Amino acid sequence: MLTLIGLAIIITIVTLLLFEKVIPIIALSAIPFVGALLAGFGIGDISEFFQQGVNKVAGVAFMFMFAILFFSIMKERGLFDPLITAMVKLTRGNVVAVAVMTALVAACVHLDGAGAATFLIVLPALIPLYRRLGMSPYLMLTLMATSMGILNMVPWGGPIGRAAAVTDISPDELWHGLIPVQLIGVALAVLGALLLGLREKRRINAAGGVEAAVALNYPPGSSTDIASRGTAATQETSHDGDSSDNTAPGRAGMPRFYWINAALTLITVVSLALGLMAPAYIFMLSLSVALLLNYPSLAAQSRVITQYAPQAFNMGAIIAAAGAFLGILNGTGMLESIALDVTRLLPGQAVGMLHIIVGSIGVPLELLTSTDAYYFALLPVIQQITASAGVDPISVAHAMSIGSIVGTFISPFSPALWLALGLAGLEMGRYIRYAFLYLWGFSLIMMVVGYLFGLY
């Protein structure tokens, strides 16, 4: 009975998230409550299960909230602007250099793990450049998706935060094992960009040169053409109303307190990597310094918190709801019951390898499930099943995270991806056909890298 009700809860949540019928908070909060009642548990028991689950993820939720606020301020203050401008200038119209620059810029700007913000910052700068050179905008999005996926391995990134909430492992601890994989991943993303850039250069030459490639990729009147022209116009006028509040006197174009903000960000990241304090408190202190430095008045501080609070609250609320979901499924014994029954049906050797098998098809699964469903519904089941074979939960989290992480921005259930497609005037189906095999192949290589480092 527990197995059937537990599976019903998970399938219902996945279905609701898959078809976008409700937001994750509703699915993760309400469905487990109803399932626990049907299983015969009382209100008091369910409340206790909820409290246990939320207590486990409270630190992760708070870290997310303050991390999003901190990095949002850094972006608003132009921390990444000079880097983008310099790298665009360095390419000098070289197709291969533009491809490599795209991968590097996306990795740098995605430091905060917020996909929508990264697309909003990078795409307007790159689309006119891609159009001018006749480069495919689908290449641009594929390169960005790869780098942004690798950067999502940071402890404040969405996938790792979800994995930490599910496995009750500190995001810092998860990240420490992933750091070498992440560094190699960035290098591989640059190498992949180099190879795709060479292929794109050959394609442009085969099409008859830049003008013919532009006509092919940006036909007049198409959504891609309109989007590229629109972002070019926006780029040309974006600095017309720039106030001196954000620019250092005597250093045109350099944001005020740029190097202090850069040093503060570096200190924050290093402190996290070294585990000097609780991650949430590190970001709380960094946010306080950033606010006092960049927004000295009470009105300005209140304005910036109010502006970015919705995004921070949304992620914190989702993590808290995930705690309720996992607390109830663990407390009622449903996860254990599912694991035991599934284990009986699997060959003995497959149980200990299940997390690697699932990680290897992580990118295809991103097309079928949302990130929330993958981590909050699938990961805990795989963790319970493999536990019977003595597999460490951190190994399960590593394998499933590495296998799916570059597929985050190919999923039709990613709101940030729809924003990117709208900004660039691209089609979802064509993008999936363009990027799917490359991203899946990249993820399989990353799985091998993780295995070589002994992560699973």
Image (cartoon, helix red, strand yellow):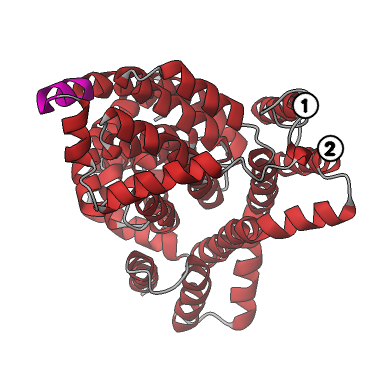
- Around disc 2, counting alpha carbons within 10 Å, would you say few (fewer than 14), some (14 to 19), or many (20 or more)? some
Q: Which residues are magenta?
A: 200-208
Residue placed under numbered mark 2 in the picture: 293
Residue in view at x 41 percent, y 54 percent: 419
Residue in view at x 56 percent, y 28 percent: 176
Q: Is residue 28 magenta?
A: no
Q: Give the structural element (helix, strand or loop) at label 1.
A: helix
Q: Position of residue 129 (x, y in %)?
A: 38, 31
> Reading the chain from its start, which is encountered first: label 1 or label 2?
1
Indicate which disc residue 378 carries. none
Q: Let me know if residue 403 appears in the view.
A: no
Q: Compared with residue 47, is residue 453 higher up or lower down, i.e. above or below?
A: above
Q: Amino acid at mark 2?
A: Leu
336 relative position to 299: left or right: left
Q: Compared with residue 181, is residue 161 higher up or lower down, i.e. above or below?
A: below
Residue placed under numbered mark 1 in the picture: 260
Q: Position of residue 279 (x, y in %)?
A: 70, 39
Q: Let me know if residue 45 appears in the view.
A: yes
- Around disc 1, counting alpha carbons within 10 Å, would you say few (fewer than 14), some (14 to 19), or many (20 or more)? few
Q: Between residue 317 and residue 249, name the one nearer to us.
A: 249
195 relative position to 312: left or right: left
Split into 4 quadrants, where in the image is the N terminus? bottom left
Q: Position of residue 226 (x, y in %)?
A: 33, 51
Q: CA distance from mark 1 to mark 2?
A: 9 Å
Q: Compared with residue 203, is residue 423 higher up or lower down, i.e. above or below?
A: below
Q: Position of residue 385 (x, y in %)?
A: 36, 50
